[in-house]
Amino acid sequence: MVLGVLLAAFFGQGAVRWTGWMGTIFIRLLKMVIVPLIFTSIVSGVASVGGGKSLGRLGLKTFLYYIATSMVAVVTGLLLVNFLKPGVGADLGGAVHSELPSLSTPGSLGEIFLRMIPENPVAAMAHGDMLAIIFFAILCGVALIQLKEAQRTLLRSFVDAAFELMMAITSGIIRLAPLGVLGLITTAVAASGMGAFATLGKYMLTITAGLLIHLLVTLPLLLRFVGGMNPIVHYRNMAEALLTAFSTSSSSATLPVTLRCVEEKAGVSNRVSSFVLPMGATINMDGTALYECVGVIFISQVMGFHLGLQAQWVVVVTALLASIGAAGIPSAGLVMIFIITEAIHLQGPQVGVIVGAMLAIDRPLDMLRTMVNVTSDSCGAAIIARSEGETGVNERVRA
């Protein structure tokens, strides 16, 4: 990022000719993995719920908790970004001087859900119709669970392997982020000057405020009034897992630590934790959902778009569903940003430049939102365990 700023400051558009191609290639690589990553991730995540008793009372409670908390997180982000308006009046990479593409704005909430049902799933994948792809992936995951054991095992192994393959490819692309940031920041600063960083500071403030509200207000209130537990005690019990999540930016890598803290310190049974937490590490991404919602509306504000209520509902629904498919690896939420921008047809090279600028300051935000994701998982495990009649959950800090 620093090198890109210096190159743009000293050489202007000449530096863009030298380095801009790296940013273009990086954004194209990110877009390349969207469809296969989201499809395999959601099918694998939904199928991981299991069949039989796993889809009974415990599964229903887990699913409802994850959907509810993610929706609250998205709405929190939506309210903040509309109130603070971090992208209004900004010009990252000359975005406001570019020709604006036509935006897809459905006429009603019912039309949003109607758009989710694809007439042709293959065509939906070819054209990047994200709402339809997500719906079809969820449907495939649910249907996979219903198959006979031999067929279910075979397909689960294939889907899980395909998901691991896409995670490996995505991780490799994310490793190229420094080069991509160099090219994209050079382009942004050469076009808009140092004022870009004031805009990014407002953007960071908006997301940080939303994440902290969810972490320090929403989840503690759920623990207190839904679970009947002491939030301070729970957070102390989970301190090791939260520090691990913050330092690794990976909810998947943190899972073993989360399991140990939830069982040994928070007092949740293995029956509940072994079901709720792995599922949460796959599909419960409160912080990521909030980040995606704020990020997409920030992009629209920078580009001079006014997103009406219906278009913002598309963002909310897609952010909620896309967070289910966000892989538990560092910066995976960045890939999901393109899912939502494609869903409302917010396209063009300017989107890539703005996302590149967002990526330059993404690491601390990624650390914080991963901590929010893991906290939500642990709160869910504790609340569901208490609802299952487990006593002693969260009563004291254990050694």
Image: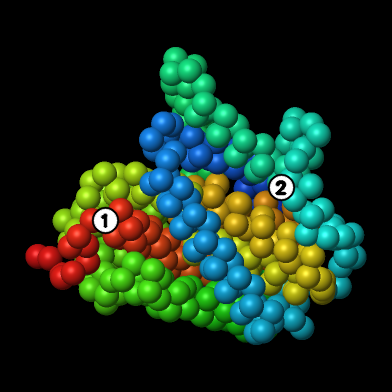
Q: What is the x, y in percent for residue 110?
A: 79, 55
Q: Residue at x 70, y 61 (%)?
A: 315
Task: Using the image, determine if residue 87 lies above or below residue 25.
Answer: below
Split into 4 quadrants, where in the image is the N terminus?
bottom right
Q: Residue at x 65, y 84 (%)?
A: 84
- Would residue 139 appear left or right of 219 to someone viewing this image? right
Q: Residue at x 72, y 42 (%)?
A: 132
Q: Quadrant of residue 396?
A: bottom left
Residue 77 seen in the figure: yes
- Would residue 329 appear left or right of 246 to someone viewing this image? right
Split into 4 quadrants, where in the image is the C terminus?
bottom left
Query: Can you name the residue that lies furthest to the left here?
Result: 399
Q: Residue at x 62, y 48 (%)?
A: 30
Task: Using the image, determine if residue 279 lies above or below residue 17.
Answer: above
Query: Can you name the residue that lies furthest to the top here?
Result: 150
Q: What is the x, y in percent for residue 53?
A: 38, 35
- Would residue 338 appear left or right of 152 to someone viewing this image? right
Q: What amino acid is labelled 1 in the image?
A: Gly
- Between residue 165 and residue 391, name the one nearer to us: 391
- Between residue 82 and residue 392, name the one nearer to us: 392
Which sits earlier in the primary sequence, circle 2 or circle 1? 2
Which secondary structure, mark 2? helix
Q: What is the x, y in percent for residue 126?
A: 76, 35
Which secondary structure, mark 1? loop
Binning the other alpha carbons within 10 Å of mark 1 as few (below 14), some (14 to 19) or many (20 upward) gives: few
Which residue position holds label 2?
A: 131
- Between residue 259 and residue 327, name the one nearer to us: 259
Q: What amino acid is labelled 2 in the image?
A: Leu
Number of numbered discs present? 2
Which residue position holds label 1?
A: 389
